[in-house]
Image (cartoon, grey):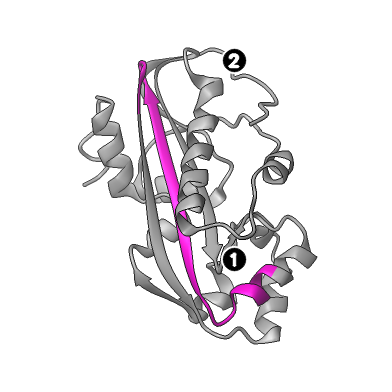
Amino acid sequence: MPIIEMCEEMEFDTPTIVLATGSPARKKILDNAGIPFVKKIVPIDEELLNAEIPHEGVSRRFAERYCHMLVNEKQKPFRGRVRNGVVVTCDTVVWCDGRILEKPLTREKCVECHEFVSGKMTYTVTAMAVYYNGKSASNVKTTWVKIAKLPPAVIDEVANEPATLLAAGYRTQGAIQWYIDCKKGEIMNVVGLYLPTLRRLLKKVDFPINPQWFA
């Protein structure tokens, strides 16, 4: 994976969560939970990466391994450069009928992705990794989601929402939410930051957790 830049050295007076993701939804989850954090993004060339990894004719297991690889690679720019902070990276991909569906990035691709998943069972794969004081831990969760047949008007509406272009596979909020049925797993995993998983990973790397965070 090509790294565009390395993280500058960071040091905190108290144990701090460093959220290394640009996702507004993940930021909102931590905000709503009252969990303090610092947001720091080290960008990667996702278009180049997607060109290097096959996205067609692959298995669901391949999609899970791919997502797991992404979050661990995103940890690398921070290792040895963050003191008294735990770095949290997340990524989500959608697998459906042999395809890995990434962020559409363009309206045309967004329409095509939503037309593809319409009326199908999809598998949302979310990976999370944490790194703290030389220790790392990661987790991959897959949620089965049935997408009802999407009317063209709904596809057109979600494709015009800027947030949709940065959502892996398909939009989960707005008009489309009434067409989504979580069959197996946690719907919060579809959003991309499942707090019970975060808590388990923080404990694995011996990060001092404030009991109020996950009350």
Between 86 and 125, the one nearer to me in the picture: 125
Q: Dot 2: few (<14), some (14–19), or many (≥20) neighbours within 10 Å?
A: few
Residue 198, how many percent across, how many down?
A: 33, 41
Cα–Cα span, label 2 and label 1: 34 Å
The residue under the point 53% across, 78% down is 120
Q: Is residue 157 left or right of residue 144?
A: right
Asked if residue 103 shows in the view, the reply is yes
- Mark 2 vs mark 1: give the one in front: 1
Q: Is residue 154 left or right of residue 35?
A: right
Residue position marked by numbered label 1 in the rendering: 170
Which comes before the other along the chain, label 2 or label 1? 2
Residue 90, how many percent across, how many down?
A: 48, 42
Query: As shown in the figure, which amino acid type bears the numbered disc 2?
Result: Glu
Asked whether 133 falls inside the magenta stretch, the response is: yes
Q: Quadrant of residue 143?
A: bottom left
Q: Secondary structure at mark 1?
A: loop
The residue under the point 25% across, 30% down is 204
Query: As shown in the figure, which amino acid type bears the numbered disc 1?
Result: Tyr
Q: Secondary structure at mark 2?
A: loop
The residue under the point 38% across, 47% down is 140
Q: Which label was assigned to residue 8?
A: 2
Between 104 and 35, the one nearer to me in the picture: 104
Q: Which residues are magenta?
A: 113-136
Asked whether 135 falls inside the magenta stretch, the response is: yes
Q: Dot 1: few (<14), some (14–19), or many (≥20) neighbours within 10 Å?
A: many
Q: Quadrant of the N terminus?
A: top right
Asked if residue 39 shows in the view, the reply is no
Picture layout, residue 200 above or below residue 130 = below
Picture layout, residue 140 above or below residue 6 = below
Residue 100, how many percent across, how many down?
A: 59, 58
The residue under the point 45% across, 60% down is 190
Between 130 and 211, the one nearer to me in the picture: 130
